[in-house]
């Protein structure tokens, strides 16, 4: 198992074919984009607080009207 993981990581670090190099480049760009979005949308001090009441409002069906 560890040999497979090591081979996978080695292939990612030193891709041999142009297609593998392009795939690694795109994955790195996506990872940078996701990290940037997380930092921009959810700074550490402004994380939304979710409690049981908020989840009940979102998940529960709307109250029936008599």
Image: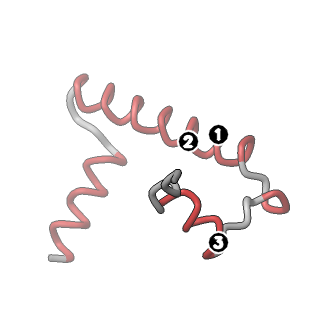
Q: Cβ–Cβ below 8 Å for labels 2 and 1?
A: yes
Element at label 3: helix
Mark drawn on residue 34: 2
Q: Position of residue 27 (x, y in %)?
A: 40, 37
* Towards the viewer: 49 or 54: 54
Query: Looking at the image, which residue is at 66% across and 40% down?
Result: 36
Quadrant of the rendered image containing residue 22: top left
* Towards the viewer: 49 or 1: 49
Q: Closer to the observer: label 2 or label 3?
A: 3
First reached walking from the N terminus: tag 2 or tag 3 = 2
Element at label 2: helix
Q: State the separation of the CA atoms marked 3 and 1.
A: 28 Å
Above or below, comparing residue 53 to residue 61 in the picture: below
Mark drawn on residue 37: 1
Residue 13 relative to residue 30: left or right: left
Residue 27 relative to residue 49: left or right: left
Q: Position of residue 5 (x, y in %)?
A: 23, 66
């Amino acid at each position: 198992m560890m040999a497979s993981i090591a081979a996978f990581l080695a292939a990612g670090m030193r891709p041999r074919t142009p297609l593998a190099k392009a795939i690694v480049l795109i994955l790195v760009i996506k990872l940078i984009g996701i990290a940037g979005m997380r930092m921009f949308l959810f700074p550490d001090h402004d994380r939304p607080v979710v409690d049981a009441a908020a989840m009940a409002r979102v998940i529960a069906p709307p109250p029936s009207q008599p």
